[in-house]
Amino acid sequence: MQLTVHEAASYLGVNESTVRRWITMRGLPAHRVNERLHLNAIELWEWAMEHGIAVSRRLLEQARRRPEEVAPLSELLTAGGIHHDVGGTGKAGVLREIVARLPLPADADRPFLLSVLEAREAMGSTGIGDGIAIPHVRNPIVLHVEAPFVTLCLLRHPVEFGAVDDKPVHALFTLISPSVPTHLRMLAQLGFVLRDDGLRRLLARRAAAPELLARVRELEHQTSGTHVTARHVAGGGEPP
């Protein structure tokens, strides 16, 4: 889903000049097509999450026009698994450990996935702050999986990840999805629960899986009628 600068500004709740300034000064991904700038919906949502900037729910409503449903985050985490005491020294080592734990099909090309994740990190860290990162492929259909899942890895020792707040990372959520709309909705669910200070504290102390899932389910019960935004995911405030 490609957006014009005007459309992106509308979703972000700012004017076009601010969007152009963020493209130039803050690394908002944009692509030039036929001499005009365009933005990718997923890249826009990811960037907003990483910078603590609100995104209108209308962007997600565009994805919801697709008929498929996405399971609650608690179910996605159950499918993907919660792993404690994950090793690895440095970003590359941690990503290698994560890929080894993903419940992928037997014929999945794990070395290829690792290279894609590393390339994604080279474009900009997925560390969103407060010791949390969300490593994921920028093109979600690259793996051709049948069902989405989220895998949470809690590290034995925090590692430097180039996060937005420069804090080392101790909790990493990896998203695997079969389509772009599913990917967006998974990001939205994760963005909502990660606003919760209680969940962040549980992640910081590497709480047991049942305790983490229980808190996520509590938060899911609160989502009815809630405006989903990326604001405060990275601990930020109003857009500058």
Image (cartoon, rainbow, N blue to C red):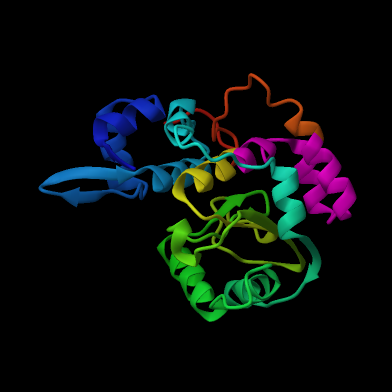
At a point 53% along the width and 56% down the height, the residue shown is 126
* Quadrant of the image containing the C terminus: top left
Residue 183: image location, x then y, percent: 52, 48
Residue 147: image location, x then y, percent: 61, 55
Q: In the image, is residue 60 above or below residue 210?
A: above
Q: Which residues are magenta?
A: 189-217
* Quadrant of the image containing the N terminus: top left
At a point 10% along the width and 47% down the height, the residue shown is 35
Q: Nearer the viewer, residue 236 or 188?
A: 188
Q: Nearer the viewer, residue 219 or 109?
A: 109
User: Horizontally, is 78 left or right of 131 in the view?
Assistant: right
Q: Residue furthest top?
A: 225
User: Horizontally, is 222 left or right of 191 in the view?
Assistant: right
| Total numbered circles | 0
Indicate yes or no whether the magenta region holds residue 213. yes
Residue 203: image location, x then y, percent: 78, 51
User: Horizontally, is 39 left or right of 183 in the view?
Assistant: left
At a point 69% along the width and 50% down the height, the residue shown is 76
Residue 48: image location, x then y, percent: 47, 40
Residue 131, quarter of picture: bottom right
At a point 61% along the width and 42% down the height, the residue shown is 70
The secondary structure that dominates the magenta segment is helix
Q: Residue furthest bottom?
A: 111
Q: In the image, is residue 86 above or below residue 153?
A: below
Indicate yes or no whether the magenta region holds residue 232. no
User: Horizontally, is 12 left or right of 198 in the view?
Assistant: left
Q: Nearer the viewer, residue 150 or 65?
A: 65
